[in-house]
Image (cartoon, rainbow, N blue to C red):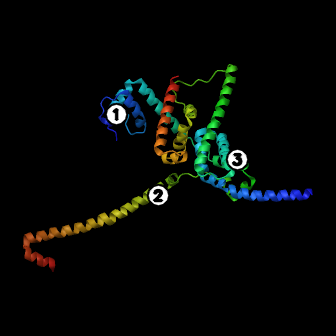
Amino acid sequence: MKPLFERKNPDCKTIRHWIGDILNSRLSIHCDWVQAHIVNCPRCQRRLTGFNRVALGLHFIKSQRHPKDLLQKANQQTLMVLHQSLQQLPQAQKLRDKQPRPKFLYRMTRYSQSISHAAACLAILILMRCGIFSGMEKFQSEGQKVIHQYYVSNLGEDLTDDIFTA
Amino acid sequence: MTTKSVSLDWCWDLTQEGSVTADRKWVLTAMNQYGDSLIKLLWRILGQEQDVCDAYQETFLKLAHCQDGIRPRNIKAYLFRTAGNVAVSHLRKKKRHLRACQQIALNSATQPNENVPGEIDQMELQQKLRDQILQLPQYLRNVVFLHDLGEMSYQQAAQTLGISVATARVYRCRAIQFLAARLADRKEK
């Protein structure tokens, strides 16, 4: 990691190289010295705006989903111009009806609530098994020690040993 | 005599068809394997349904006929690079067409639409970014396509393009700087 935060008065050239880092969140724009410079430097303001615009544009492009049947349509159009023998294969038929398959994590989001509930139950069971039962045993042995101590102080050690060993 | 030759032709067609099926079956396998991610990439580059279908078709036709039907060594790399190139040529063609239409509109003295200053127009920004990506040199553009639009990691993108991971990172950084500078300039004008 670069010693970015030790610099007090970085110049314009240095900030210029760090603007990329700011957008990649490796460096916060809320740092006083970054803010102080960018507020007073129109060139850096312009650069930052440019980077932000690129990030925003890419985000817009990525967030626009294609129609669900686009893969199907494209496959059908492509298969039409391929060799006729390929068009008749069962694999080609499957491609004609193919739908886009969402990623594994995305498919699992619908089960996320059930998974988290099951995980919570499992965690409670483990805690009960390890934490509470071992705690109970500890509590029991500590209690026995206290009673032993009480008898020793009131009756003496010999009598207490007789009582506890009996 | 005529009947004989026809029947021979028919036999020839049958044998040829059988060999073509066996030889080109890998095209369908590639379509099944990479079709989904290819559509996603093309959609992000082109943004129009019909353009995506056309570019997809052209890409697979090129694949089927590349090196006289010989299967390329790295099908994924071939497909993604071809798709990028095909998409770029589609965009350029479209841009030329649009320019011609605008020229006609100017000649007929119609008023252009003016946006409210300062308003972030999502479509406009997307279009500007696509235009600027087109202006990038090919080696930078390929990295942006694969890493930013195709959602490949640097390693996958580097493997596809046949460059090192470090080079891919440098290219991507340069591409973003270029785009940022161009978008910042354009807004001021």
* First in sequence: mark 3 vs mark 1: 1
Give the spatial CA distance, label 3 vs label 1. Answer: 54 Å
Chain of the residue on which disc 2 is drawn: A
> Which-is-in-front pick, marks 2 and 3?
3
Mark 2: few/some/many CA within 10 Å (<14, 14-19, 20+): few
Q: Can you tell which mark lies on residue A31?
A: 1
Q: Nearer the viewer, residue A91 or A105?
A: A91
Q: Is residue A35 left or right of residue B70?
A: left
Residues at marks 2 and 3, CA–CA distance in whole angstroms:
41 Å
Residue B107, compared with residue B65, is above or below; it is above
Q: Which chain is mark 3 on?
A: A
Q: Residue at x 55, y 34 (%)?
A: B137
**Residue B169 locus on image (x, y percent):** 47, 41
Task: Report x, y in % for residue A76.
Answer: 69, 49
The quadrant of the rendering that contains the C terminus of chain A is bottom left
Determine whether A162 is above or below B29 in the image: below
**Viewer-side residue, A143 vs B24:** B24
Q: Could you say which is closer to the camera, residue B101 or residue A117?
A: B101
Left or right of residue B88, residue A14 in this image? left
Estimate the x, y position of residue A49 in percent, counting from the top left. Answer: 46, 29
Query: Can you see residue A93?
Result: no
Give left or right: position of B148 versus B7. left
The residue at which mark 2 appears reads as: A114
Disc sitting over residue A77 in the figure: 3
Q: Nearer the viewer, residue B82 or A72?
A: B82
